Amino acid sequence: MGQHYPFVNYKIDGKVVTLIMVSESGVATPEMAQRSMAAFKQRLQKDDVVLVAKGVSLAPIFIGAKPYVEKLKDLPLHQIAWGKVEM
């Protein structure tokens, strides 16, 4: 059995983007973020993925395509109806 991650399919500019909550350590360095992103994209067989982590100040960190990150930067995480995905 794998790990469970909170996720949600979220519409941005008419596209369905999958937001996946990961630990900050999963995106702590560019290499870790790239590895995490590649693993989720492969598992989900989807390119429209944004990784979400809570930073030290509990402010959200968004990792993904710049247009998606720009649209999400002010989104409060508590307003999202998170589900779970197993990896």
Image (tube, grey):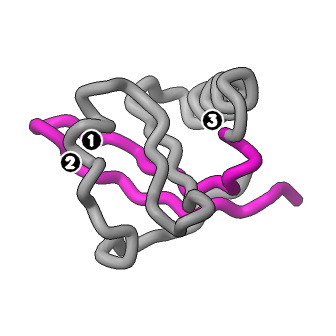
Separation of disc 1 and disc 2 at Cα? 5 Å
For marks 3 and 1 on the same chain, the one whose residue lies earlier in the sequence: 1
Task: Determine which residue is flagged by label 1.
Answer: 16
For marks 3 and 2 on the same chain, the one whose residue lies earlier in the sequence: 2
Nearer to the camera, 44 or 59: 59
Q: Are marks 1 and 2 in contact (CB under 8 Å)?
A: yes
Separation of disc 3 and disc 1 at Cα? 15 Å
**Residue 32 rendering spot, x and y as whole percentages:** 74, 30
Q: Write down the region rendered in magenta.
A: 1-27
Task: Determine which residue is flagged by label 2.
Answer: 11
Q: What element carries label 2?
A: strand
What amino acid is found at the position of numbered circle 3 in the picture?
Phe
Q: Residue at x 11, y 37 (%)?
A: 13
Task: Determine which residue is flagged by label 3.
Answer: 40
Q: Which residue is drawn at 71% across and 31% down?
A: 29
**Dot 2: few (<14), some (14–19), or many (≥20) neighbours within 10 Å?**
few
**Residue 80 rendering spot, x and y as whole percentages:** 34, 71
Q: Residue at x 27, y 41 (%)?
A: 16
What amino acid is found at the position of numbered circle 1 in the picture?
Val
Q: Is residue 12 above or below residue 30?
A: below
Q: In this view, does 77 lie above or below 45?
A: below
For marks 1 and 2 on the same chain, the one whose residue lies earlier in the sequence: 2
